[in-house]
């Protein structure tokens, strides 16, 4: 079985985010990118499936800062094929990414495609469902564990109240991973350095992007600071009376 895992990098929210002079995008001059957390779980789930039986894992991403390091780390975990799409992705949205990944996946012909279920910079839909539509494959999202048997996969979805649903899907299919069955493993840097001497990153040039269908951003801005909180003082009855008065003024009572 061949498993493909397309991953993306997202802005590190620990860093201070600034808006470029145009006012409709983030300033990428000093923007630090990190692997999308859910995509990291998708890679871990793919490695777990490989370890349970025979199979190959292909991890692919677009050219960006830290891409090579992540791909070599994936190889140190057990990935068999590393692919980096090269080109100008500065204006890429999820629709454009899904299209370039779909072209690659049509060539690779994997039995199973795992993606992170979402990312914190998704404005125009998650990559997984878009990929499934472009490839004409079934999609199940928010998966927290799966089992492969023959030409079928049973995906487990967790719901509130401790409920777990099992969805059987015929392969090939696309799954959006919310959490792998174990946390993404840590790989010592010494092992990654060792892999760098043997593993090879295949570079595939992408000549053009088609961002159609995505959300057009007209303006971005920092949240405005304002003093709108009203602190109510007094005893419980007095505060309750004030709350009732406020609700009446707002027309909710």
Image (cartoon, rainbow, N blue to C red):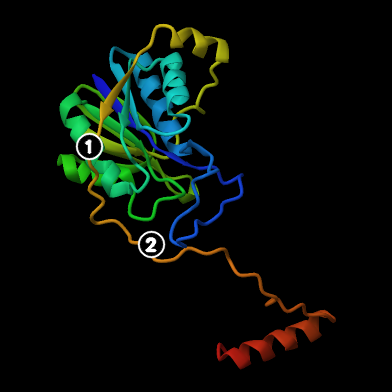
Residue 159 lies left or right of residue 86; in this view the side is right
Question: Which residue is depicted at the point 42% across and 40% down?
Answer: 178
Instruction: Please tell me whether residue 125 is drawn above or below residue 12 in the rendered image.
Output: below
Mark 2 lies on residue: 217
Name the N-terminal-most of marks 1 and 2.
1
Residue 22 lies left or right of residue 171; in this view the side is right
Residue 47, given in percent of the width and then of the height, sits at 39, 20
- Distance Cα–Cα, label 1 vs label 2: 24 Å
Q: Secondary structure at mark 2?
A: loop
Which quadrant holds residue 247? bottom right
Quadrant where the image shows the N terminus:
top left
Residue 223 lies left or right of residue 83; in this view the side is right
Q: Is residue 116 visible?
A: yes
Quadrant where the image shows the C terminus:
bottom right
Question: Which residue is depicted at the point 27% across and 31% down?
Answer: 113
Mark number, residue 207: 1
Which quadrant holds residue 98? top left
């Amino acid at each position: 079985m061949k498993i493909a895992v397309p991953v993306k990098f997202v802005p590190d929210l620990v860093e201070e985010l600034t808006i470029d002079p145009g006012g409709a995008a983030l300033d990428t001059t000093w923007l630090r990118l990190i692997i999308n957390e859910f995509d990291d779980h998708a890679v871990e789930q793919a490695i777990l499936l490989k370890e349970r039986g025979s199979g190959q894992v292909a991890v692919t991403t677009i050219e960006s800062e830290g891409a090579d390091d992540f791909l070599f780390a994936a190889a140190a975990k057990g990935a068999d094929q590393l692919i980096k799409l090269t080109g100008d992705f500065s204006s890429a949205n999820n629709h454009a990414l899904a299209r370039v990944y779909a072209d690659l996946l049509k060539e690779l012909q994997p039995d199973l495609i795992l993606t992170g279920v979402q990312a914190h910079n998704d404005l125009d839909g998650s990559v997984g469902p878009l990929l499934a539509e472009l490839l004409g494959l079934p999609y199940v999202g928010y998966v927290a564990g799966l089992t492969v048997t023959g030409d079928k996969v049973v995906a487990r979805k967790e719901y509130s109240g401790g409920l777990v649903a099992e969805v059987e899907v015929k392969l090939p299919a696309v799954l959006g991973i919310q959490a792998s069955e174990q946390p993404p493993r840590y790989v010592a840097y010494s092992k990654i350095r060792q892999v760098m001497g043997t593993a090879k990153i295949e570079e595939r040039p992408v000549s053009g992007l088609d961002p159609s269908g995505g959300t057009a951003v007209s303006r971005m801005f920092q949240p405005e600071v304002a003093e709108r909180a009203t602190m109510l003082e007094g005893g419980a009855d007095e505060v309750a009376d004030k709350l009732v008065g406020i609700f009446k003024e707002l027309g909710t009572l």
